[in-house]
Image (spheres, coloured by chain):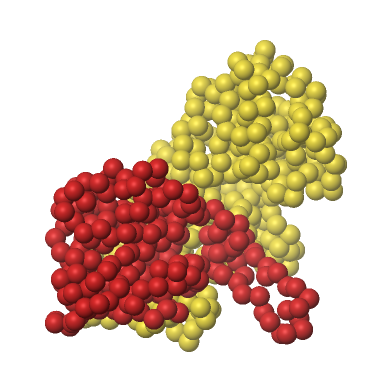
């Protein structure tokens, strides 16, 4: 199998035991060497946005919190560096659905640790759905039990990654619940998204859920 | 969309767009029987979203999925042909003239042709008579190469030589497609065409990624009209191409002599031991001499990882030397190549990315670790061919540093020796 990022042929590692139990080593669409190049976020992090920071909350989150926004307690797994951008380019923008396997396990493990009562992926617009054919976040959570209770209000929206920072911060609430009057009382909800850049999207989603009575909300993103 | 955008092209459309297509257009499903109709790749079982299947092999041209269609209008060859499209003032040498005539003959007979001419023989200029005849005859022509650098370098030269308008297409080309008689493109772009061209010229046919790539070879075949023909240009033909020649499927023109008539510079093989650990005193002496003589040179190393280490070592030894390193992923590659060309840099360290298609006047070449498997025989011959390309300095040195004298290096040297011997039998 060739690695989707570097194009090198990767061979599965067989152990003697694998032969006896007819077990085939699992291979991901990206080779081990390329996976090593993703930078994991370790060490002291900001408890609010999940970025690598000595002080918590970091200067940016301080502004959000003093402005009166509820905390999102974001956890990010990887830094949004060149390698991650490369991956997103292929997976999200080129629509390589088969690349979802790379982070499935890691996200599932993190969600087990967070242990929410409900996992909610950030929705995509109908237009993106038609064009791309899949929700990039739900695809990662294929093996988890998810509740797609959020939906986008408008059918099309400007692509987030094309906006400037100021434009992003000025976006209005894009989400609503799938069914009105959904009672979320007592639920500990974990919202999952791909990248957290300003935190605007995540805050919109969480305020939407808080309005329906959610008790506690935290968020997990793949990259920050 | 304009009607002419569909001439001989495969334009992806959604189902609801079909009624709005111009008259006379035909549509085929984008993926049929598990085969992508654009790149003819068998669809992998993993290339499947919850609702549809898609082709990942040609996804960098925009992903095709099975709910899409490809629209096309058969190529009508409607363009204004110029009576005298060529305005090139230069003169071909008698040997170049001979090859050019053979190309014109092949064109008239509608047969495919291989031009095997050594590096620096003037392959581009030799094409001009054939291109002129084809343009006058109202044929649609594609000039393609697997190397984007070659295309980028060729565009201004063609623009100077021909009055005919053309588009330049490659991955992140600034131009958008429009219907022209002549198309300059990377081989990947041919996947977007179907039975469009009467003539396709493939420059550097042995280069990565075209060589041994079924997808791209198929792309060239499908972009050609049934009666169309191909012209392959190379300095290092693969065994497969030569087999086609010996089986008489392909005509060949051999030109083993450079336009200035001087023999090809051959390798000077020096054993340099473990050069990654310590640069051999022989290399150090050559560097010292270059600093004094101000001779410009290129250094080739096998891997991107070797670049910085070599650069640091050389700047430590010769701090006054103006030197830089570049590789395929370097954002400033064009800038450094330009600086080298303008003599702002005396030396450039690089990987095989600059092995072909670039011309620096009067340079020497140094290869470190030429015995690394990265350097194939063809790559080594191409690298040696960077040397002595200008008539003002038709010779040069190719210092070849090896740890072991491998078969590939020796064979490459013998090949150049053979070509030089053969070249003596040919007129300039």
Foreground residue among B392 and A162: A162
The C terminus of chain B lies in which quarter of the figure?
top right
Residue occupying the point 31% across, 54% down: A48
Residue occupying the point 27% across, 56% down: A199
Q: Where is residue A93 in the image (x, y as percent from the top left)?
A: 37, 63
User: Looking at the rendering, which quadrant does residue A8 occupy?
Assistant: bottom right
Does the rendering let one see residue B67?
A: yes
The N terminus of chain B lies in which quarter of the figure?
bottom left
Above or below residue B361? Residue B40 is below
Judged from this view, the residue extending furthest toward the top is: B292
Foreground residue among B146 and B197: B146
Q: Chain B is drawn in which colour?
A: yellow
Q: Position of residue A177 (x, y in %)?
A: 19, 77
Does the rendering let one see residue B112?
A: no
Q: Say which chain is red.
A: A
Residue occupying the point 73% across, 79% down: A18
- In this rendering, position of residue B338 left or right of residue A118: right
Above or below residue A193? Residue B270 is above
């Amino acid at each position: 199998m060739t690695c989707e990022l570097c194009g090198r042929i990767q061979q599965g590692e067989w152990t003697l035991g694998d032969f006896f139990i007819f077990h085939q080593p699992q291979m991901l669409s990206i080779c081990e060497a390329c996976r090593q190049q993703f930078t994991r976020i370790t060490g002291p992090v900001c408890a609010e946005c999940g970025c690598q920071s000595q002080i918590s909350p970091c200067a940016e989150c301080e502004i959000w919190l003093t402005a009166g926004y509820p905390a999102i307690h974001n956890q990010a797994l990887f830094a949004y560096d060149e390698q991650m951008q490369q991956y997103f380019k292929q997976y999200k923008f080129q629509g390589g659905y088969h690349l979802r396997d790379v982070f499935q396990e890691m996200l599932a493990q993190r969600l087990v640790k967070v242990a929410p009562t409900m996992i909610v992926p950030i929705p995509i617009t109908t237009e993106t759905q038609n064009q791309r054919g899949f929700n990039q976040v739900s695809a990662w959570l294929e093996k988890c039990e998810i509740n797609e209770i959020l939906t986008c209000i408008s059918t099309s929206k400007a692509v987030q990654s094309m906006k400037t920072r100021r434009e992003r911060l000025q976006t209005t609430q894009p989400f609503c619940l799938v069914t009105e009057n959904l009672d979320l009382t007592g639920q500990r909800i974990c919202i999952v998204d791909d990248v957290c850049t300003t935190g605007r999207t995540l805050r919109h989603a969480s305020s939407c859920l808080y309005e329906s009575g959610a008790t506690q909300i935290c968020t997990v993103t793949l990259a920050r | 969309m304009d009607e002419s955008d569909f001439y001989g092209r495969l334009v992806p459309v959604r189902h609801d767009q079909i009624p709005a297509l111009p008259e006379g257009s035909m549509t085929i499903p984008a993926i049929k029987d598990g085969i992508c109709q654009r790149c003819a790749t068998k669809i992998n079982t993993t290339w499947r979203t919850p609702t549809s299947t898609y082709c990942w092999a040609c996804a960098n041209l925009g992903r095709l999925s099975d709910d899409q269609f490809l629209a096309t209008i058969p190529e009508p060859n409607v363009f204004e042909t110029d009576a005298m499209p060529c305005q090139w003032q230069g003169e071909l040498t008698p040997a170049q003239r001979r090859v050019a005539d053979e190309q014109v003959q092949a064109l008239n007979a509608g047969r495919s042709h291989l031009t095997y001419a050594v590096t620096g023989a003037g392959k581009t200029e030799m094409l001009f008579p054939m291109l002129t005849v084809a343009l006058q005859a109202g044929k649609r022509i594609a000039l393609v190469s697997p190397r984007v650098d070659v295309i980028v370098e060729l565009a201004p030269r063609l623009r100077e030589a021909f009055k005919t308008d053309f588009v330049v297409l490659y991955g992140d080309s600034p131009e958008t497609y429009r219907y022209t008689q002549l198309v300059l493109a990377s081989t990947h772009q041919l996947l977007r065409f179907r039975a469009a061209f009467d003539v396709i010229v493939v420059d550097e046919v042995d280069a990565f990624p075209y060589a041994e790539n079924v997808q791209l070879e198929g792309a060239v075949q499908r972009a050609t009209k049934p009666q169309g023909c191909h012209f392959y240009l190379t300095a290092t033909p693969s065994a497969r191409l030569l087999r086609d020649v010996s089986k008489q499927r392909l005509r060949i023109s051999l030109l083993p002599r450079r336009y200035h008539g001087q023999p090809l510079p051959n390798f000077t093989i020096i054993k340099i031991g473990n050069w990654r650990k310590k640069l051999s005193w022989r290399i150090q002496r050559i560097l010292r001499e270059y600093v004094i003589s101000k001779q410009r040179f290129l250094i080739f190393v096998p891997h991107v990882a070797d670049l910085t280490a070599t650069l640091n070592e050389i700047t430590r030894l010769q701090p006054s030397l103006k030197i830089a390193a570049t590789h395929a992923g370097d954002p400033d590659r064009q800038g450094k190549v330009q600086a080298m060309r303008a003599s702002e840099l005396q030396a450039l360290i690089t990987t095989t990315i600059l092995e072909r298609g670039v011309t620096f006047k009067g340079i020497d070449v140094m290869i470190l670790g030429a015995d690394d498997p990265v350097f194939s025989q063809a790559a080594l011959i191409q690298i040696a061919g960077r040397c002595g390309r200008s008539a003002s300095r038709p010779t040069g040195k190719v210092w070849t540093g090896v740890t072991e004298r491998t078969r590939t290096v020796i064979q490459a040297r013998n090949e150049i020796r053979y070509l030089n011997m053969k070249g003596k039998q040919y007129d300039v």
